[in-house]
Image (tube, rainbow, N blue to C red):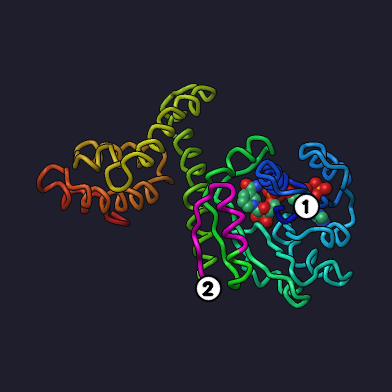
Amino acid sequence: MKPSISLIGAGAAGTALLLALSRKGYPVAAISSRTSESARRCAELVGTHSFSTDNSAASAAGDIVFIATPDSLIRPVSEEISGNGGFHRGQLVLHLSGALTSDTLTDAADLGADICAMHPIQTLAEPLEGARLLESAWYCLEGPTPGLEQARRLTQSLSGRILTVAKTDKALYHAALCVASNYLVVLEKLAVEMLVEAGVEPVAALPALMPLIRGAADNLAQCGLPTALTGPISRGDTATVAQHLRVIDDKCPGYLPLYKDLGRQALRIAEDKGNMAPGSAALLEALLKAGS
Ligand SMILES: NC(=O)c1ccc[n+]([C@@H]2O[C@H](COP(=O)([O-])OP(=O)(O)OC[C@H]3O[C@@H](n4cnc5c(N)ncnc54)[C@H](OP(=O)(O)O)[C@@H]3O)[C@@H](O)[C@H]2O)c1
């Protein structure tokens, strides 16, 4: 018999994870949330009647407890539960934050529970799709050994792949994910604005970019770095880059420093890839110099 799971915080991530694990045979012990509506919605999805707004009772009922509240509430909720004796020896208590360390759960550890931070490296908006995405996702685990080992088994039951990151490197780890995901969105916003400046209809701009974005992501998945880099810098096409710099300076000068910064990073990748036209690296370097 697999250990039972209690969920505290029936939002996007918690509900998706509970659904994914219940499909793998983990019994649901109890669900609690700030509002009974969220707890009920989650309970209906996983097929249980055990839902409430009583975090401590819900926590006490499970062998494994996921605290899936917003990051800022993980410690207060954990303090509330421990104050009511809702953690006990032999339990595994986890949170799902990528930015916070397992130290956020010291109140549970003080009552004898094993603890771990288990961050799914996935974007979870809707429970059914989220549960699907959580299968075979990557998970970052951080915490003391007994909890870490149990969390490893949980992620393995989802066919998940595991990164372990030291407590001291957690902030840099999270910043990297922010660059990979959030800043991709920022770049697409800038690209949309440049297309509109170039006369493209605003409604068509993002849809026209989507196949290109998916193609780049597919190339990254299939060929990796540095091969996935294409475009004028990858080819060493200096005249095209010079033209870009002129037109950006003219039409949207605010974007010039970013274009140059990213261009210099692209140049490092292009040099690794090694198919630039001879002599073009130095020319590109000069063109893309900061402040030039
Ligand atoms: N969503 C993602 O893509 C994602 C990915 C990886 C990790 N995470 C992590 O997962 C955690 C949850 O994020 P989320 O995106 O799922 O947030 P969310 O959708 O806003 O869900 C948070 C849930 O916490 C509940 N809650 C708030 N205060 C509470 C309290 N005092 N007691 C019990 N429940 C309470 C809310 O309940 P009500 O609905 O009843 O108000 C809400 O359902 C965070 O640590 C986040 O960093 C999220």
Drawn side of residue 8 relative to residue 154, left or right: right
Which structural element holds mark 1? loop
Outermost residue, front side: 1
Drawn side of residue 221 relative to residue 273, left or right: right
- Residue 28: x %, y % from top left: 78, 49
Residue 153 figure quarter: bottom right
Q: Residue at x 68, y 62 (%)?
A: 94
Task: Tell me, yes or no, whether the two marked residues, 2 and 1, touch with CB atoms within 8 Å.
Answer: no
Frontmost residue, 259 versus 184: 184
Residue 140 figure quarter: bottom right
Residue 129 painted magenta: no
Q: Residue at x 88, y 42 (%)?
A: 49
Tag 2: amino acid: Thr
Tag 1: amino acid: Gly
- Residue 155: x %, y % from top left: 58, 53
State whether label 1 is within 8 Å of ligand 1. Answer: yes
Q: Residues within 10 Å of mark 2 (few under 14, many from 20)?
A: few
| Mark found first going from the N terminus, 2 or 1 | 1
Residue 165 painted magenta: yes
Residue 245 visible (yes or no)? no
Q: Residues within 10 Å of mark 1 (few under 14, many from 20)?
A: many
Which structural element holds mark 2? helix
Q: Is residue 255 above or below residue 143?
A: above
Q: Which residue is mark 2?
A: 168
Q: Which residue is mark 1?
A: 9
- Residue 234: x %, y % from top left: 24, 42
Frontmost residue, 274 versus 135: 135
